[in-house]
Image (spheres, coloured by chain):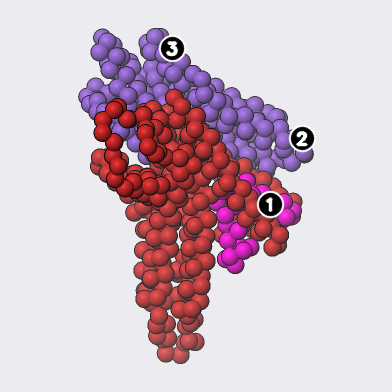
Amino acid sequence: MNATIAYITFRGMLGRRRALLLLALPVILLLLAITLTATGYNDLSSSTAVLQRFALGALLPLLALIAGTGVIGPEIDDGQIMYILTKPIPRPVITTTKLLVAMALIVLFAVAPTLLAGLIMSGVTAQLAFAFTVGVFVGGMAYCAVFVALAVVSRFAVTIGLLYALVWEVLIGNVAPGARKLSILQWATSVTDSLTSATAVTSEVSLGIAVTLLVIVTVGGAALAGIRLRTLSITGAE
Amino acid sequence: MTSTIHDIGYRHYDGPRLGRAYVLRSLFVHNLRAAFGLGRPIKSKVMPFLLFGAMLLPAVGSVAALALTKEPGALIRYSAYAVFLQPLVAIFLAAQSPVIASREMRFNVVPLYFSRPLGRFDYVLAKYGAFATALFILLATPVTLLYAGALATREPRQPNPGEAPPPQLPGIGEHTVHYLEGLAGCVLFALVLGGLGLVVAAFTPRRGFGVASVIAVYLVSLTVVTIVQGIAESQSKYTISGWAGLFTPFYLVDGVQVRLFGAETSTPQPPPGPFGGVVFAAACAALIVAAVGILYARFRKAGLR
């Protein structure tokens, strides 16, 4: 953990128009929650649908992709990473710092709005808001670690991340149920499932396996990013 | 035409000029090639061709299934193909629209284009046209493959002894009509998605963020519409559910396909009646015109820097 790198990364992520994109997504979630509550459609099944489909299924992967690749990808692209790499700072410290920044952004822009939206729509019924907050949190940590590692490994991190989140987890997951076992989304759903009594939340992965895999993926992603940054080769942008 | 800012006092060129059409055509071809990474390093070709290949796979599988089973239902409907594979189409859109819309902005070279005798409107038209054409190629190639597969498989399955005769495969005429409807749908998909992608990408020039913001527009609009449709249908309010499709690009175009081109619906709920189809088509037209207008304003500003 290096305070200066953390500060520079935060400034890079929240500077000017970029913060608007990060802010727009949770604002839409909260607007949806407020509208549904105001019009009286905030029954348990609708609340579950919003939290599951929007908060966990769309908002979380998108924000994790933006935060996870955004903390390190652009710097590698335009070569600015060299100014950090030439300082006597261990490479794993650099990636861990950037990963922690991405995770902090996820807590700020995905986890907190999920809790808020859940409380607005369903209060404390069936522990729904709390369960989804924990689910979004653990899923967010794993997504961040994977996407930071991807951003170090490949220049196409955003597109590869999208292929994973949209094509593997959704398109192939719908056709071939086996694919759902290897899906951060499903593992996070499994954690949520164990914490709420709402029956609409079901997962194909048992809690023990889900937690184990989440930990492995999070730690593995963080480690891989550190290892790959040690032998990074800088090529010109585009 | 006579003097540009590159006139530094040498003898003038008095020969024939190639004119506006030539400029338009060159820009169109350049951008169309750029959309697939042609004329650029191999790294830029990987993603577009990977996605293009992935788009073809289900069509190949479907044609093979038709040839083996001779069941008419084995062939994916032409008009449903884009909706069925919308994540892939959306990723292609997100990955490639920054290439067309914002790469020149990122390197501040837009003024170089406008210092030539090239109109801003022509510039936008060439870019939009090229990107829509690239999307059309992406969407229409697998549909054409399906059509070719349908034409190649004409013989119905031989019935086993004592079995009722198997279902007849649809005739060539029927297939051709549906294929042409499907192509018309592809044109509309290409125009609507291309306009949306270019506008969003043109306002987020930073690399990576353009991709993320295009996909955010697609994913957020789809998710919100799905949730609203789910709630509306649980209350049996099918009209509201139909109208909700207006707010997400794939359902918007499919609504036009269903109501005006006579396709079967590929979405949870098509727009109500012929009137809904007209409104959806008007929304598509408005979106396309607005995209051209916004891109024009955006590039005029970028051209001043």
Residue B236 placed where, x, y %?
A: 74, 55
Give the colour chain B carries in the figure: red
Image: magenta residue range: B236-265
Disc 3 is attached to a residue of which chain? A
Give the colour chain A carries in the figure: purple
Give the residue type that dot 2 points to. Ala
Give the residue type that dot 1 points to. Trp
Residue A133 placed where, x, y %?
A: 57, 29
Q: How far separated are the C-alphas under marks 3 and 2?
A: 40 Å
Residue at the farthest bottom position: B162
- Name the residue at 56% across, 40% down: B293
Residue B34's place in the image compared with B162, above or below, is: above
Which residue is at the front of the view, A157 or A74?
A74
Q: How far separated are the C-alphas under marks 1 and 3?
A: 46 Å
Residue B119 placed where, x, y %?
A: 45, 40
For the residue labelled by badge 2, is the local secondary structure a helix, a strand or a loop? helix
- Name the residue at 43% across, 46% down: B126
Mark 2 highlights which residue? Answer: A38
Q: How far separated are the C-alphas under marks 1 and 2?
A: 21 Å
Taking the magenta stretch, the answer to whether it contains residue B71 is no
| Residue A45 appears left or right of B217 | right
Are the numbered discs 3 and 2 placed on the same chain, yes or no?
yes
Residue A7, label in figure: 3
Residue B243, label in figure: 1
- Give the quarter of the figure containing the C terminus of chain B: top left
Residue A82's place in the image compared with B182, above or below, is: above
Residue A17's place in the image compared with B170, above or below, is: above
